[in-house]
Amino acid sequence: MYRITFQTRQRKEMIDITTEILKVLRENKINDGICVIFVPHTTCGITINENADPSVRMDMVNTLSSIVPEYGKYRHTEGNSDAHIQSSVVGHSVTLIIENGKIQLGTWQGVFLCEFDGPRTREIWLKMK
Ligand code: ZN
């Protein structure tokens, strides 16, 4: 298993981590297989979406914040219930196909770490087979 650490800078943001994943893939010389990426945090998520136009990720963060607002009738006393809920909405893992030494993504797709309660130091775990 491989770990990559990221430092997030805002309370909510989506960080394009595609390049970092490709680097691990290249270092491990895996030609064909599967790559599972897992986020071991309860207020963070991982997803695949458009990385060409940055306004897409801004729309996603803003819409998730309007669906699950920061202040609501929450019982959790830490003050980050919105982040916990958004984390589960987005999910904690993605699976990628590796073929001919490359991660198979659509033309406009990238992999994003979704921070919902930053800024913090975050980790992703990767397993390639
Ligand atoms: Zn909490």
Image (cartoon, rainbow, N blue to C red):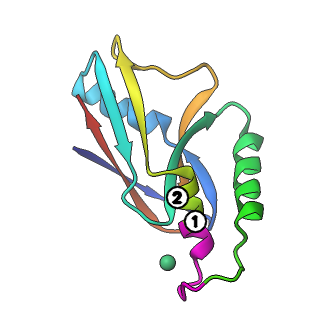
Tell me, yes or no, whether the highlighted magenta stretch contains residue 80.
yes
Residue under numbered circle 1: 85
Q: Where does residue 87 sit, x and y in percent of width and height?
A: 53, 60
What residue is drawn where x is 48% and y is 68%?
120
Q: Is residue 10 visible?
A: yes
Judged from this view, the residue extending furthest toward the top is 100
Quadrant assignment for the N terminus = top left
Q: Is residue 115 visible?
A: no
Q: Are marks 1 and 2 in contact (CB under 8 Å)?
A: yes
- Residue 101 image point, x, y percent: 33, 16
Q: Which residues are magenta?
A: 75-84
78 or 23: nearer the eye? 78
Residue at 59% from the left image edge and 28% from the top image edge = 109
User: Which residue is outermost to the bottom?
Assistant: 77
Circle 2 residue: 88
Q: Is residue 41 left or right of residue 2?
A: right
Q: At which x and y percent is residue 27?
A: 26, 29
- Amino acid carrying label 2: it is Ser
Q: Is residue 106 above or below residue 44?
A: above
Disc 1 on helix, strand or loop? Answer: helix
